[in-house]
Structure formats: structure tokens, C-alpha cells
Amino acid sequence: MAFKQPRTGACGALRRQGCGGTVSFAQRARHAARREAPQEVHPIPPELPDGPEDPRPEPPWSSPGYSPPPPGWHPPTWGGPRTDPLPPPPRPPRGPSRWHRLLLPVVLLLLVAAVVAPLIAGYRQAAVSGDEISRFLPASLASPTPSATIRPLPSVASDALSRVVTIETQTPDHQELGTGWLFDSRGDFVTNAHVVEGALSVRIRDRRNATHVGSIMGVDHEQDIAVVRSLDGFSGQPLPLGPSVDPPVPEDVVVLASGRATGHEDQSFTIETIARLHQDVPVRGNVEIDPSDASTVLYHDMIAMRGHQVFPGNSGGPVLDGYGKVIGIVTLASRSTPQAYAIPIGRVVAELTAFASKS
């Protein structure tokens, strides 16, 4: 087969048609040789097994016919399938719920109530009268007057003397005189047991010199107390009782008495001072009535007073503090010294109440 001699272009190489866009025979020959040469085929890596085996494919140079990798070459890494579940996507921030919106006003309302309630209670307490307060206090603590301040003792005595009487008893061989004081609104009077001891009859004489027939409601010789009731009643306000606690020492008090019983009509009260508390006093029998009586009686837990002379007719009379309350019952007196002893009212008030409750 004869080939025409191709023309040589300006480019200095064999071309089919000029220099631009033509392929020389040498280039075509090289392309053909490349197509006829065997192609290099790489094997497909096997599927990755399940489990803990290394999931990376075998490098190509580990197969026969492959050469080692060049220096500095690193195979690609693959972490394998992910076995842990992905964390849930973050939730968008939520606004306050309906309950939270309602809770704030409730909390504010409670705070306001906690601040305002004590103020209202304080105002209500300030507006309560003394009479209302007295209704909630024990009888021994309730004030008998609108004022609970200490008053002068002569003024206390002047207000209380209308409720102090003479207890007159008749025995087979003599008459006994003592002092009594109004205990309640039923006409019950408190005096000493030794005043009414052995009495065949009892009379109560008030400061207007009126006489009332009396009846003995109860006697405790060991405590030396007795209650005598006026059978026709008695008009007057009972003397208030003091609290069942020890009075302060020293403390000025006023002792009331029947002037008829003491023989000193012009001296119905004396100012005394409490000197000691809880005294034990031994007393001999009444030698004036029975000279042969040498017995000794021991009085326990007595209030010791000193100041002015207290007479035998004072027996059973009340001891009042500056508030006008009865804190003791005069029982013993010294004939030679201005010293006397009284029974604390708190020690015997329960028994006196029991005597007066009898019908």
C-alpha cells in the first residue's frame, strides 16, 4: 500500500492539514500503542466483616506482585461503623410554664400576709381593754382595779377595811376574838383555826357593828386555817388574792385587823416589812387559857415580818401588798418584839376554795 508523502508545515512536524488543530502521525501511533498495552487492574477489597476485626483494607503491596510503599506514605484510616447511638439533639430552651407563672403571685401574696398579719395582731392587742385581758387571766393574776400600779399602803388599807370583820366565838369557858376577811361573794370569811377551835357558836361582826350568824364550813388545824360563812350573806367585793409565788424580800406590806379583836380601835392596820420567807416557827400552847399546856406546835413555811407591834387579835387577818392583794394570813405574833408570822396564801388557797365550795 503506497502512502503519499505528507507536506511539512511551518511547525516543523508531520501534519494532516496545517499547524492548527491537527494530529501528527507520531502522536496517533503513541495513542494506539497505549490502547493496545495491557491495563493495570487493582483487586476490589473484600467486604468488611462484622465484629471487632480491623476494618481497614489490606494495602495493595501486601498482595503478590506489588512493591513496598514509598517512604513517607501513610494509608488512609477509617474508624469503621459507629456502634454507639448519637446523642439526641439539644432541646431548645423552654419558657416558664403556666404553673410557674401562677406560683410567683401566690408567693408574693404569702410574703405580704406574713408582714401585715403581725401588724394587724399588734393593733388588735393594743385595742383590747383591761377587762378583756382579765377574763383570760387566772383569778389570782387578774387585776381587781383598772390600774395595776402600786399604791400607797395606807390607801390600800382604807379601801380594804370594809371587808375585814371580827370573828366572835363562844366556848364553854371563854370567848375568843379574831379577825376575818371576805373570801368570796357568798359571804365566806377566812380566819385561823385556833380562833374557832372548840366554838359552840360563831358570830361575824362587821365595821358597822352589824352582827351575822356564822357557820364553820371547814377547818384545818395543821395548817391553822378555817372558813366561816355568814348565813345571811354579806354585801361587798371579796379581797383579791395575790399570785402563788414568793413575794420579794424585803417588801413593805400592810396588815389589817379588827380593832375590836385587838383592843385598839384606833389602829386597824400596821405597816410591816417582809424580812424572811419559808421560816419554821415552834410555838408553845396557849398558857393564858391553859397554864398547864406545855405542848409545842411547829409551824412550817411561814412569812416572817417585822415593824410595828402585832397583837393576838390580829389572828386570821389579811396581809396585803401594794397592789391591794392578799399574800398572807396573820397567824403568830411575838409578845415582846415587833415581829409576826403569816401563812403564804398560795400554800392554802386550794383548801380554802374547797371549804368555801360547800353548800
Image (cartoon, rainbow, N blue to C red):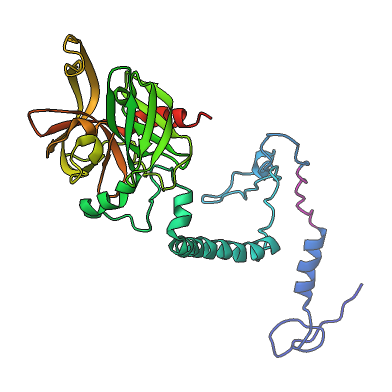
Q: Quadrant of residue 213?
A: top left
Position above or below: 292 against 309: above
Q: Is residue 121 left or right of residue 89?
A: left
x 20%, y 43%: residue: 265
Residue 96 visible at all = no
Residue that protrudes farthest toward the right in the picture: 1
Q: Which residues are magenta?
A: 37-45
Q: Quadrant of residue 139?
A: top left
Depth check: give the residue in front, 107 or 159.
159
| Residue 309 location (% of width, % of height) | 12, 37
Q: Quadrant of the N terminus?
A: bottom right
* Residue 290: image location, x then y, percent: 20, 13
- Please tell me in which quadrant of the rendered image residue 152 appears: bottom left
Vertical side of 267 occupied by 28: above or below:
below
In the rendered structure, the answer to whether residue 245 lies left or right of residue 237 reads: left
Residue sitting at 37 percent across and 43 percent down? 210
Q: What predominant SS class does the magenta segment belong to?
A: loop
Looking at the picture, how far across and down is residue 269, in whole percent?
Answer: 21, 44
Return the x and y of residue 15 as percentages of the image width and height.
Answer: 78, 83
**Residue 200 within the magenta-colored segment of the rendering:** no
Who is closer to the viewer here, 70 or 207? 207
Describe residue 36's horizontal placement relative to residue 181 as left or right. Answer: right
Q: Residue furthest front?
A: 173
Number of dots carrying numbers: 0
Residue 221 seen from this side: yes
Which residue ends up furthest to the left in the rendered image? 336
Residue at 78% of width from left, 85% of height from top? 21
Q: Is residue 40 magenta?
A: yes
